[in-house]
Amino acid sequence: MPIVIFELPDGTQRKVTADSGTVLMQAAVSNGVDGIVAECGGNASCATCHVYVDERHGELVGPPNDVEDEMLDFTAAERRPTSRLSCQVQVSDALDGLVVHIPEEQV
Amino acid sequence: MSTLMAAAPGAPVVELDLAELRDDPYPAYAELRRTAPLAWVPSVGRHLLTRYEDIVRAEKLPEVFSSREEGSLLLRTVGPNLLREDDPEHRRLRAAAEPPTRPRQVRDLWAGTFERNAHDLLDRIAGRGEGDLIGDFAEPLAAANLAVVLGLRNASADDISDWSRAMMAANGNYADDPDIWLRAEQATRAIEDAVAEMAEAARREPDGSVISSMVHAADPVELTEIQNNIKVIIGGGVNEPRDVFGVGAQALLRRPDVRDRVVADAGLWKRVFEETARWISPIGIYPRQLTQDYEIAGVALPAGSRVALVIASGNRDESVFERADEFDIDRPHRPHLAFGGGPHFCMGAWVARHEVSALAWPLVFSRLKGLRLVEGADDRMEGWVFRGLTSLNVTWQA
């Protein structure tokens, strides 16, 4: 199972094991990673599980889907080219070692 | 699954008076959080779950805390609808109805009309120098905006308001008053007729509205389903923006220092919105029913147990929000529960945020100069299932 790393705004890192076939947000929430609120539980309707994919891994994760792209315009923290909603990022073995950065604000 | 209309073995039983809850539920909630965070309340016919962490846990477990509650007041009022369904049925209906309420659609399709509606209402009252910001502004604004988003061009703002009030009364009709049921039936029949007419129009000519979106959904939706879900949206879609507007406006008028900061820095309106929704949750409570045995807040609940998630109480939980009873836009940020969570996260959240915090408050506070509360006015906060101001009497320079 892939290991993914959530980096908090203060620079500390949380390494968690993510289950292939789930989404990145679930890995964060089930491991109690601070800063991933996920109010809507993964339905791309609240924009509170925003992450910045580390620039080294952008291609690995790919671009947002259409609904996600819309929601990303309304995140609490600024949108960047590497912004994703973690509830829309499917976990697979290919993501092993992925680093994502958690923004300061989610709501 | 059978419905258990009684206390779970081991659950504390706490008597609460419905009239007292309507007046001010917060002292009772504080006591429950402290002494009985899962308590059977006979007058409500449910176990009330009152601590923040427990509510969040329940919201994230829709497969255990089901929205399909037997004997639900909402089901009786409007018929089967997405709020009382679980996924995948809930998802099918939500996917059909949701696109017009997403933030970009709100900005691109509806914001201009919302702004005109607000200006029209202010034009009507600006020369008077006094008024009730609930009855004269917030309620007709929320109703007019809702008619646009839903695609009910054949209904006036007054129609929408009347229907909403009748259904919301039925929804909170824990006392089983027959007159309340009758008024709700009249309202829901009128909505069915109005929706049928506009669904037919949208079939011929899509207009981006919720009715149009449901008519043209990829996964087909029946007319009855459109009608019932529009009823639900009319129920919540008026009172939530109206109540957030009223409560937040009153809080600012009582705190001129905060008002001055917000008026000078438009970026703060968002914080006023989220803090107001936390402080007085317009929807205070919603029901769930257990699909399996489950232990929460130290009580083993059998399958079929009825539970109410008291989000108004979670939003005042001192372990999460310091000085939780105070309105404070500068408090350290923790997510509030006012929009609910999980798959049922409020579909109207983006609409309400825009119409209230980007438009209604800034326009009222900039156009009505010298706005102040009328001293001694009987502006009461009322309700516990739904809570808001009955009126907000103010004066300004005409």
Image (tube, coloured by chain):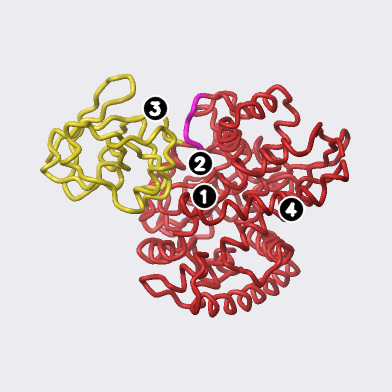
Q: Nearer the viewer, mark 3 or mark 4?
A: 4
Q: Which chain is red?
A: B
Q: Which residues are magenta?
A: B332-337
The answer to whether the residues at label 2 and label 3 have Cβ atoms under 8 Å apart is no
Mark 2 and mark 1 on one chain: yes
In the image, what residue type sits under mark 1? Answer: Arg
Q: Position of residue B387 (x, y in %)?
A: 67, 46
Q: Nearer the viewer, mark 2 or mark 1?
A: 1
In the picture of the structure, the residue carrying the numbered disc 2 is B337
Mark 1 and mark 3 on one chain: no
Q: Position of residue A49 (x, y in %)?
A: 35, 39
In the picture of the structure, the residue carrying the numbered disc 4 is B120
In the image, what residue type sits under mark 2? Answer: Leu
Of residues B38 and A66, the one nearer the viewer is: A66
Q: Callout 1: few (<14), some (14-19), or many (20+) C-alpha neighbours within 10 Å?
A: some
In the picture of the structure, the residue carrying the numbered disc 1 is B107
Work out how far the residue at label 3 is from the one at label 4, CA to CA, in angstroms: 39 Å
Of residues B116 and B20, the one nearer the viewer is: B116
- Chain under disc 4: B
* Residue drawn at the location 59% of the way across and 67% of the way down: B231
Residue B25 lies in magenta, yes or no?
no
Mark 3 and mark 4 on one chain: no
Q: Sequence-wise, which precedes: disc 2 or disc 1?
A: 1
Indicate whether A56 appears above or below B145.
Answer: above
Work out how far the residue at label 1 is from the one at label 3, CA to CA, in angstroms: 25 Å
Residue B286 relative to residue A46: left or right:
right
In the rendered image of this protein, which colour is used for chain A?
Answer: yellow
Element type where label 3 sits in the image: loop
* Position of the N terminus of chain B by quadrant: bottom left
Q: Callout 3: few (<14), some (14-19), or many (20+) C-alpha neighbours within 10 Å?
A: some
